Image (tube, rainbow, N blue to C red):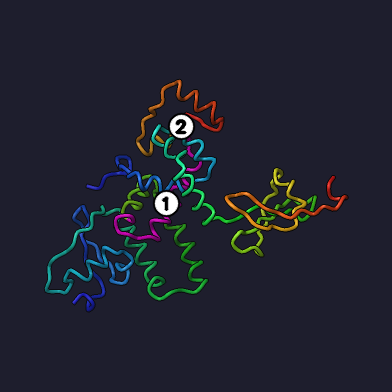
Amino acid sequence: MATGGNNLYVPREIIIEILRRLPVKSLVRFRAVCKDWRNLLKSPSFIKEHYHHSTHKNPLLVFDVYNRNSIYSLLCSLRYEKETVKAERILEMDSLRRVRRLIGSSNGLLCVALDCKKDDTA
Amino acid sequence: MSSSVEAITVLSSDGDEFKITVSAAKLSKPLNWMLEDVCFSDDCDEVPTIEVNSKTLVKVIEYCEKHAPRANSGASDSDAEELKKWDIEFMKMDVKDILFHILMAANYLHMEGLYDLACQTAADLMKGMTVSQIRKIFHIKNDFSSEEQEQLRRQHPGCSFD
């Protein structure tokens, strides 16, 4: 007879495959599951794989806020630089307001060109 | 010859018979090999067994039949969009009971598309779960001592043991 999901043993490689698709916030929480997960989730190889997977699947980056009073942030795709997506405004990213151009990125670090007009620095 | 038949019969691990069209079976590498190796003509009574239970196999075949036309002939953007919507509906099954079975079947049958879809569905489901919920679905025992838990909590304020 078919066994229900309750008795199913999921192999480690499949668990890793699922964990690679989880957001970082969940992964930090799941370090507390058991020692094996803690060691896995903090291993450089897993972190590297996770990073590659998430940038490949979701290469979006908060890049600019056009309007000071705008309730939206604009997300700019790293793969197709012309493509922007409206997203809910992320207050922490307001410091990027003066960003005028994305020069490049590496492992999540950005190199940007800022607009240095005086009236913009308030 | 196998090329003369349009559908083949396979057995589930529970011993039930299922029909799957040749074009749908080609989505799985092992099934494709079977098609080449095993005689599927009418005068051959050998029915290959797939080590997947009936309940799961029904879903896997449903997925294959839906995706086969696109895999075999390519598709327009609107088809791809329609298929994406279908995938979302398809994954709205009794996930806790069957999702992991689908995942393992997709892995065993080398079905990249279904494997990816099932992994993503599992991840979407798990991301909001608590640590104790995760332990429950994977049957994991908390093997941290209370000192270790305290240390982990200090290092990662986001960590929760509940």
Percent x, y of residue B73: 40, 76
Give the camera-side residue of B61 and A63: A63
Percent x, y of residue B78: 52, 71
Give the camera-side residue of B115 and B63: B115
Which element carries disc 2, helix, strand or loop? Answer: helix
Q: Is residue A81 magenta?
A: no
In this picture, which residue range is highlighted in magenta? Answer: B106-130
Query: Pointer 1 indicates a residue of which chain?
Result: B
Residues at marks 2 and 1, CA–CA distance in whole angstroms:
21 Å
Q: Which is the main secondary structure of the residues drawn in magenta?
A: helix
Which residue corresponds to the image point at 62% horizontal and 49% vertical from the top-left?
Answer: A109
Percent x, y of residue A23: 52, 45
Which element carries disc 1, helix, strand or loop? Answer: helix
Which residue corresponds to the image point at 70% horizontal and 52% vertical from the top-left?
Answer: A73
- In this view, the mark in front (2 or 1): 2
Which of the labelled discs sits on residue B119, or is there none?
1
Which residue corresponds to the image point at 47% horizontal and 25% vertical from the top-left?
Answer: B149
In the rendered view, does B89 fall on the left or right side of B158? left
